[in-house]
Image (spheres, rainbow, N blue to C red):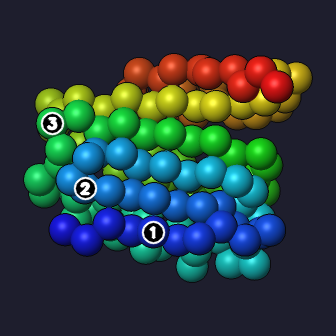
Amino acid sequence: MEPLIIEGTPKTPTVKFDAETGVVEIKGRSIPENSVEFYKPLVDWLEEYKASPASKTQVNIQLEYFNTSSSKCILDVFKKLEAIHKAKHDVEINWYYEEDDEDMLEAGEDYESIIRIPFKMIEIVE
């Protein structure tokens, strides 16, 4: 399965999904013009990945900021990961947030309360 790599822009995050290593990363800002269009390839890739995931899937989410429409799409990404987790595969989500960014910490906690996957909150200290 081909890795999914999307270079980040000021409005869209950098995406690196690698089936071989089982590492799924989304980093940067997520304020795309059309969130559904931007996130569709990510959700589609995870749907395909679900058929034969790596022994462990490590998810690294490090967003500085995301808008409301992105938050729904990010939830869709998490739901695909939850399906992999429910199929008895090892999935771990690392949610990174800046030291003083209470909003991003809360956003991670909100997702954790919805999605049945272990989240690890990781504070980035400057």
Q: On screen, 92 above or below 33? A: above
Rounded to the nearest angstrom, the CA distance separating label 1 from label 2 is: 11 Å
Q: Which residue is located at x 32 percent, y 66 percent?
A: 3
Task: Indicate the amino acid at tag 3.
Answer: Ser
Q: Amino acid at mark 2?
A: Ala
Which amino acid lies under the numbered mark 1 shown in the image of this protein?
Ile
State the residue in front, 9 or 73.
Answer: 9
Q: Is residue 44 above or below residue 71?
A: below
- Mark closer to the chain start, 3 or 2: 2
User: In percent of the image, x 51 and y 20: which residue is there?
Assistant: 120
How busy is the neighbourhood of tag 1: few (under 14 within 10 Å), some, or many (20 plus)?
some
In the structure shown, which secondary structural element does the residue marked by tag 1 occupy?
Answer: strand
**Residue 5 bears which disc, if any?**
1
Residue at the spot of label 3: 55
Cα distance, mark 1 to mark 3? 21 Å
Read off the residue under disc 2: 19
Which of the two discs, 1 and 3, labels the residue nearer the N terminus?
1
Quadrant housing the N terminus: bottom left
Give the distance between the C-alpha atoms of the residues marked 3 and 2, in whole angstroms.
10 Å
Instruction: Give x and y (percent) for residue 60.
Output: 50, 39
76 relative to 64 in the view: left or right: left
Q: Is residue 97 above or below residue 40?
A: above
**Earlier sequence position, callout 1 versus callout 2:** 1
